[in-house]
Image (spheres, grey):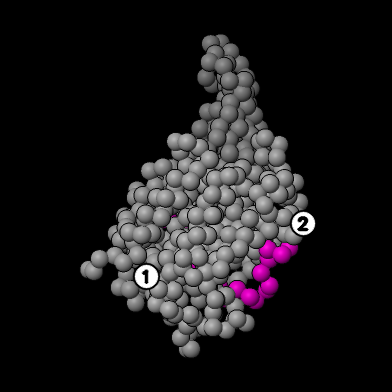
Amino acid sequence: MSAPAFGPELMARLDELGRISGDQDRLNRQPFTPAHHAAIDRVAAWMQEAGMATRVDPIGNLIGRYQGLDSAAPVLLIGSHIDSVVDAGRYDGPLGILTGVAAVQALHDAGVHLPFAVDVVAFCDEEGVRFPTTFLGSKAICGTLDPAVLELRDKEGISVAQALTAFGGDPARLAEAAYAPGSIRAFLEVHIEQGPLLEAEERPLGIVTAIQGQSRLAVVLDGMAGHAGTVPMAHRRDALAGAAEAILAVERRCAASPDLVGTVGRIDAQPGAVNVIPGRAMFTLDVRAPNDTLRKAAVDEIVQTIQRIAASRGLGCTIGREHDQPATSCAPRVQRWLAQALRGEGVPVKYLSSGAGHDTMAMAEFCPAGMLFVRCKAGISHNPLESIAVEDADAAVRVVLRVLHDLAQPEASR
Ligand SMILES: [Zn+2]
């Protein structure tokens, strides 16, 4: 195998960008902060080196345009988010931006312009850590951002509109961030997998078929509080013991179906004393699947099981459905382009779904959208231990570059 042409520089840039943080000793890059500004300044310089004209749109997305031969042709949009979680890794988000920059740099170095323009975008906010909302940047580009989110506030009481204005954006011109319908040929996001499948199967890259849908429920079980010493076991209505049985039932049901995952992430018992039988237990439930029918059927079944467990223990049971997010299918044509490019680069084709949300979910409502996953060490993400191999980063750039070249062919599928 020849030496990786693009990998080392891409990794060095990811390292450099990973040092631009709002905190001294960890990566924390929240939207509309000085760290965000410094990061897009750095990326804009790289975009300009790659022959792109750069701009920051009214919501704070950085966009670099590599001009096409036909200025009327719909553009190919490549990108991901520049914001991070607190104490983040350096690849989640920036990989998708800098892979796009690297592919365009290769075109520029070769003096090649494609029939269509390529826009590389650094979305302002995907993680939703600072404000109680996500996808500010990608939704603005699609024209689907509800202006009401401008009034949402961070924990310091600063609204999105205030933070954006201080950043140099313009809440009043939000609508100008939207691309015209039909003006984006497709959106492509390269992202670390954030899961262990590619590594386990020794595949460097994977084509995402769908982003999982998600149901969130809140369960409350009501029993009877009582003295831990005086109430005999047979006379108890212990809400927490009922919750424990229910949680194991959730685990069993979700483990029985390979495409399903279910998590109880929070539990609370009241009154919460060492010598009192819990009279009330509350827990959350998060169920995800790439297929909405499968997810809904599983949730219905889990709800019935919990109700049965509660009834058998004499517990009251209230189950609230808090959130229902349908699965997002990645565009078949983008999956085809990626598969062709993987084969062209001699990389085995592997398909998988995404358990995490991504900007692609917002983009898919507006244009054909797809994702390429890059293997990451032990599936770790949202953690400074995030790690990818230079060879895999290199392969991702080669695949994106090949997609660009393939799409430039007159007979390219549309
Ligand atoms: Zn991400």
According to the image, label 2 marks what residue?
Answer: 172
Q: Residue at x 60, y 78 (%)?
A: 74
User: Residue 41 location in percent, x, y?
Assistant: 54, 54
User: Up-down: is 384 above or below 173?
Assistant: above
Cβ(mark 2) to ligand 1 < 8 Å?
A: no
Residue farthest to the left, as pictured: 1
User: Residue 21 location in percent, x, y?
Assistant: 50, 43
Judged by depth in the image, the label closer to the viewer, 1 or 2, is 2
Looking at the rendered structure, the number of numbered marks drawn on it comes to 2
User: Up-down: is 58 above or below 367?
Assistant: above
The residue carrying pointer 2 sits among few (fewer than 14), some (14 to 19) or many (20 or more) residues within 10 Å by Cα, namely few
The disc placed on residue 41 is none
User: Up-down: is 310 above or below 93?
Assistant: above
Mark 1 vs mark 2: which is more N-terminal?
2
According to the image, label 1 marks what residue?
Answer: 398
Q: Which residues are magenta?
A: 175-193
Residue 398 visible, this orientation: yes
